[in-house]
Image (spheres, rainbow, N blue to C red):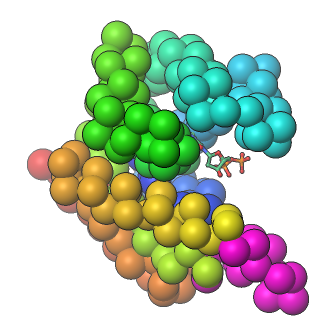
C-alpha cells in the first residue's frame, strides 16, 4: 500500500511518519519510509536548485528527474506499506505556485501533469495536513525569528493550490493544528481501515 503525506512546510509530516512507522510495525506490517526530494544525489541536486533559487521550470524538471528514479524504487516495495513524505502533489502545489505567474495556474498544472504521466504511480491514500502558514513558519524557524513575509505569502498560495488538488484527487484532509499524537492517531486509524478493506 502506497501512502503519501502532503502539506506546507512545518506541518510535522516527518515526525508523524516516524510515529506511523512505529505503530504499523508493531502491528506486524512491513513499512518502507521514504521522502521527496530523495536522499540520492538527484535529491541533493534538487535541494541545491531550491537553495540557489533556480527558476520554476528548472526546479520542476529536477523534481521529476528525482521522482522518475524514486518511482522505480517504489515499485519494488509493492508488498510493503510505503510511507512517503511528499510526492508529486508537492510539485503540483509548489511549482504550480511558482509557475502560475508565467503561464497561469491551469496551464502550469496541465504541463506538470503531462510530465508526470509517463512515470505515474498513484498512491492508495494521500493525506493533506493543514496548518496556518504563519504557524508552520514559526514551527520551523522558532518564535524569536522574524517571519519572512514573502515566504508566508508563498506558502499561503501553496496551501490554496493544495486545497484545490484535494477536491480533484480526493485527499484526506487532516487538521494539523492539534498535537502530533492526535494527528498520528487519526491517520493511523484511516490507514488501518484501508488495510482491512
Ligand atoms: P522538505 O520536505 O522540507 O525536504 P527536506 O526537509 O528533506 O529538505 O522539502 C524541501 C522543500 O522542497 C520544501 O519547501 C517543499 C519543496 N518541494 C517542492 O517545491 N516541490 C516538490 O516536488 C517537493 C517534493 C518539495
Q: Is residue 136 located in the magenta-colored stretch of the structure?
A: yes
- The spot of residue 17 in percent (x, y) is 55, 56
| Foreground of the two, 7 or 164 | 164
Relative to 34, 138 lies left or right: right
| Foreground of the two, 80 or 135 | 135
| Foreground of the two, 157 or 75 | 157
Residue located at (60% from left, 34% from top): 56
Please tell me whether residue 161 is drawn above or below residue 65 in the rendered image: below
- The spot of residue 37 in percent (x, y) is 65, 35
Work out whether residue 135 can be spotted: yes
Residue that sits furthest to the front in the current view: 102
Q: Quadrant of residue 50?
A: top right
Please tell me whether residue 87 is drawn above or below residue 142 in the rendered image: above
Residue located at (37% from left, 56% from top): 162
Q: Is residue 19 located in the magenta-colored stretch of the structure?
A: no
Work out whether residue 81 can be spotted: no
- The spot of residue 61 in percent (x, y) is 57, 21
Task: Please provide the residue range marked out in magenta.
Answer: 135-149
Residue located at (48% from left, 84% from top): 177
Residue that sits furthest to the right in the current view: 144
Residue located at (72% from left, 20% from top): 42
Q: Quadrant of residue 88?
A: top left
| Foreground of the two, 133 or 182 | 133
- The spot of residue 74 in percent (x, y) is 47, 23
| Quarter of the figure with the N terminus | top left
Please tell me whether residue 100 is drawn above or below residue 67 in the rendered image: below
Q: Quadrant of residue 134?
A: bottom right
Please tell me whether residue 122 is drawn above or below residue 130 in the rendered image: above
Relative to 112, 67 lies left or right: right
Amino acid at each position: 500500500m502506497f501512502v503519501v503525506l502532503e502539506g506546507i512546510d512545518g506541518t510535522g509530516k516527518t515526525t508523524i511518519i516516524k510515529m506511523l512507522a512505529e505503530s504499523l510495525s508493531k502491528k506486524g506490517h512491513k513499512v518502507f519510509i521514504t521522502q521527496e526530494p530523495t536522499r540520492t544525489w538527484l535529491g541533493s541536486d534538487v535541494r541545491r536548485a531550491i537553495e540557489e533559487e533556480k527558476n520554476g521550470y528548472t526546479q520542476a524538471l529536477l523534481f521529476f528527474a528525482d521522482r522518475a528514479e524514486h518511482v522505480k524504487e517504489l515499485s519494488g516495495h509493492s508488498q510493503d506499506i510505503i510511507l512517503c513524505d511528499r510526492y508529486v502533489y508537492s510539485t503540483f502545489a509548489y511549482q504550480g505556485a511558482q509557475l502560475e505567474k508565467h503561464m497561469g495556474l491551469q496551464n502550469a498544472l496541465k504541463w506538470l501533469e503531462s510530465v508526470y504521466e509517463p512515470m505515474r504511480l498513484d498512491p492508495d491514500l494521500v493525506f493533506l495536513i493543514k496548518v496556518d502558514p504563519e504557524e508552520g513558519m514559526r514551527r520551523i524557524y522558532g518564535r524569536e525569528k522574524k517571519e519572512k513575509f514573502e515566504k508566508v505569502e508563498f506558502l499561503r498560495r501553496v496551501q490554496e493550490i493544495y486545497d484545490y488538488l484535494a477536491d480533484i484527487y480526493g485527499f484526506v484532509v487532516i487538521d494539523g493544528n492539534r498535537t502530533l499524537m492526535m494527528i498520528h492517531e487519526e491517520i493511523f486509524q484511516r490507514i488501518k481501515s484501508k488495510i482491512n478493506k
